């Protein structure tokens, strides 16, 4: 939306901006909690070890770090019995693929049992709190109510089929539930687990350069600099200087990607002139083997000013911290003090986990603020949800181009569009997974994943849980990062404008 709105010079209304902030905000909170418990926990938590735990000691541990209501001995005994039934029946389900008993696991049995309980609780919790997005966006994770110029969901205090006082109250209840779990379960769990793995503050540093487009606008322009989470770049881990972001410095290489550029594969192209041309003449499929001296990845290699950049929650929190975001600074300093480590620990696998937790807490705190802003607009009679201008393609300029910068939960997401005669002539996306998972470029620079793995100790090459820890700390998502092509490079989808 922002790319097209930028191309056409459209400014969205307040209500549309606030609703977009709420949709993105609750997705951050839900997505980060899911990542910690359901996508990353098994890299650190030995689930089967929980069978040896003393439920009374687990209860004491849980109550020592939080006043969360579900912390009794009987509660944890029930969780342990349920887990025992799964194990005895050979039905571990989502717990079946980890490396149980691996020497890299360090948590005591009681901490493992507590983690299992919270894993299961988070399954129910995330299903409930995302109803804010369902109410506003109709679908998760790809909201259906976004349209160029604003949103399609109506705002009307007198209609049961629109956003009204009842909707506001409903969202407030869910926001409270979201914040309570983050504050009383997620944050305490991170702070309880991290001390057993402080050595991971020395692994997974990556490229040392961090990019954040910034997110959650405070005003309505398409690429405003007035953002709740600020925009900026950090170079060489230097938090003392936050550099501005210039989208024209974003380029992509295909030197080591299974694509080609007209004019040669060692060139870097800005997305406005970007190409997605698949041509591979070797044995098919190419991913049956890897030759890293040649082309070895479905991902392109994005670079900013010819530098590899890490994106994601760590980048956002570092940029916010260095930019003077008061609440981020407070929570980051508290986490560092609690763990007894300095700021250098942030540049690591453990740092990514901590930064994601910090971001979840500060975002969960902010969601009620945006709900109140929406309520205040409704109360004063401001019901506008769409700009209502430049909507008719026949009124568009013959040629227009724009860009949109957004921070998805996994990191910086940029869209660039060229419009000719009311139709899209070229559209390119540079997504978080491509930034972090990129192969080497023409200058032989590694991407963040590859660089972060250098020097990682691996106890058992057949069970490389240490590799998973660092890669999972980025929260990888390849589905968005890989372009859609068929094996012969033929057109797969064509969208026609009538």
Image (cartoon, rainbow, N blue to C red):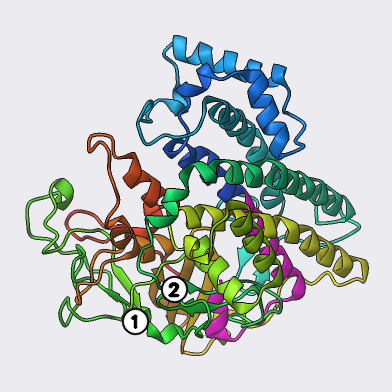
Magenta-drawn stretch, dominant element (helix, strand or loop)? helix
Image quadrant containing the N terminus = bottom right
Return the x and y of residue 182 as percentages of the image width and height. 68, 46
Residue 270: which disc?
1
- Residue placed at 48% from the left, 68% from the top? 412
> Is residue 275 found left or right of 474 in the rendered image?
left
Q: Vertically, is 94 above or below 285?
A: above
Outermost front residue? 340
Return the x and y of residue 204 as percentages of the image width and height. 37, 57
> Is residue 431 found left or right of 307 in the rendered image?
right
- Residue placed at 18% from the left, 71% from the top? 255
Task: For the residues labelled 2 and 1, say whether their Cβ atoms are less than 8 Å apart.
Answer: no
Res 396 → quadrant: bottom right
- Residue placed at 79% from the left, 58% from the top? 368
Secondary structure under badge 1?
Answer: loop
Return the x and y of residue 190 as percentages of the image width and height. 58, 45
Crowding at mark 1 (Cα within 10 Å: few <14, some 14-19, many 20+): some
Residue 237: which disc?
2
**Front disc: 2 or 1:** 2
Outermost left residue? 282
Return the x and y of residue 169 as percentages of the image width and height. 86, 50
The residue nearer to you, when weighing 347 against 251, is 347
Q: Give the range drawn in magenta.
A: 1-29
Res 78 → quadrant: top right
Crowding at mark 2 (Cα within 10 Å: few <14, some 14-19, many 20+): some
Magenta includes 52? Answer: no
Magenta includes 17? Answer: yes
Q: Vertically, is 70 above or below 325?
A: above
Upstream in the sequence, badge 2 or badge 1? 2
Secondary structure under badge 2?
Answer: loop
Q: Distance between the residues labelled 2 and 1?
A: 25 Å
From this viewpoint, is residue 110 visible?
yes
């Amino acid at each position: 939306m922002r790319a097209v709105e930028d191309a056409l010079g459209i400014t969205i209304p307040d209500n549309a901006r606030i609703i977009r902030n709420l949709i993105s905000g609750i997705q951050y909170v839900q997505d980060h909690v899911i990542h910690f418990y359901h996508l990353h926990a098994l890299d650190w938590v030995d689930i089967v070890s929980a069978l040896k735990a003393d439920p009374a000691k687990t209860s004491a541990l849980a109550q020592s770090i939080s006043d969360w209501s579900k912390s009794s001995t009987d509660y944890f005994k029930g969780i342990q019995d349920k887990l025992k039934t799964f194990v005895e029946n050979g039905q571990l389900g989502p717990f079946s693929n980890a490396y149980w008993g691996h020497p890299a696991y360090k948590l005591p049995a009681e901490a493992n049992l507590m983690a299992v309980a919270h894993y299961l609780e988070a399954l129910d919790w995330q299903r409930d709190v995302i109803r804010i997005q369902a109410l506003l966006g109709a679908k998760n994770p790809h909201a259906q109510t976004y349209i160029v110029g604003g949103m399609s969901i109506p705002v009307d205090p007198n209609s049961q089929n629109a956003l009204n006082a009842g909707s506001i109250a409903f969202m407030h209840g869910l926001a409270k539930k979201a914040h309570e779990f983050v504050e009383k379960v997620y944050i305490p769990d991170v702070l309880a687990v991290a001390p057993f793995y402080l050595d991971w503050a020395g692994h997974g540093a990556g490229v040392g350069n961090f990019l954040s487009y910034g997110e959650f606008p405070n005003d309505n322009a398409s690429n405003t600099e007035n953002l709740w989470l600020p925009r900026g770049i950090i170079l060489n881990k230097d938090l003392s200087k936050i550099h501005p972001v210039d989208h024209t410095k974003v380029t992509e290489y295909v030197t080591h990607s299974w694509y080609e550029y007209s004019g040669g594969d060692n060139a870097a192209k800005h997305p406005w002139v970007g190409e997605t041309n698949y041509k591979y003449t070797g044995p098919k499929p190419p991913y049956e083997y890897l030759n890293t001296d040649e082309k070895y990845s479905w991902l392109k290699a994005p670079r900013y000013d010819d530098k590899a950049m890490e994106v994601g929650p760590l980048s956002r929190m570092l940029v916010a911290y260095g930019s003077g975001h008061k609440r981020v600074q407070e929570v980051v300093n508290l986490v560092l003090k609690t763990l007894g480590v300095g700021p250098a620990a942030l540049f690591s696998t453990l740092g990514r986990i901590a930064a994601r937790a910090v971001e979840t807490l500060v975002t969960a705190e902010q969601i009620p603020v945006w709900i109140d802003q929406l309520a205040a607009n409704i109360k004063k009679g401001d019901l506008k949800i769409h700009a209502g201008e430049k909507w008719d393609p026949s009124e568009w300029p013959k040629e227009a181009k724009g860009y949109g910068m957004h921070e998805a939960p996994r990191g910086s997401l940029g869209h660039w569009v060229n419009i000719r005669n009311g139709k899209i002539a070229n559209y390119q996306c540079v997504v978080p997974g491509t930034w972090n998972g990129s192969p080497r470029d023409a200058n032989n620079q590694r991407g963040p994943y590859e660089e972060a793995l250098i020097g990682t100790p691996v106890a058992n090459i057949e069970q490389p849980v240490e590799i998973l820890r660092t890669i999972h700390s980025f929260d990888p998502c390849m589905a968005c990062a890989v372009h859609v092509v068929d094996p012969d490079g033929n057109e797969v989808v064509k969208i026609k404008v009538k």
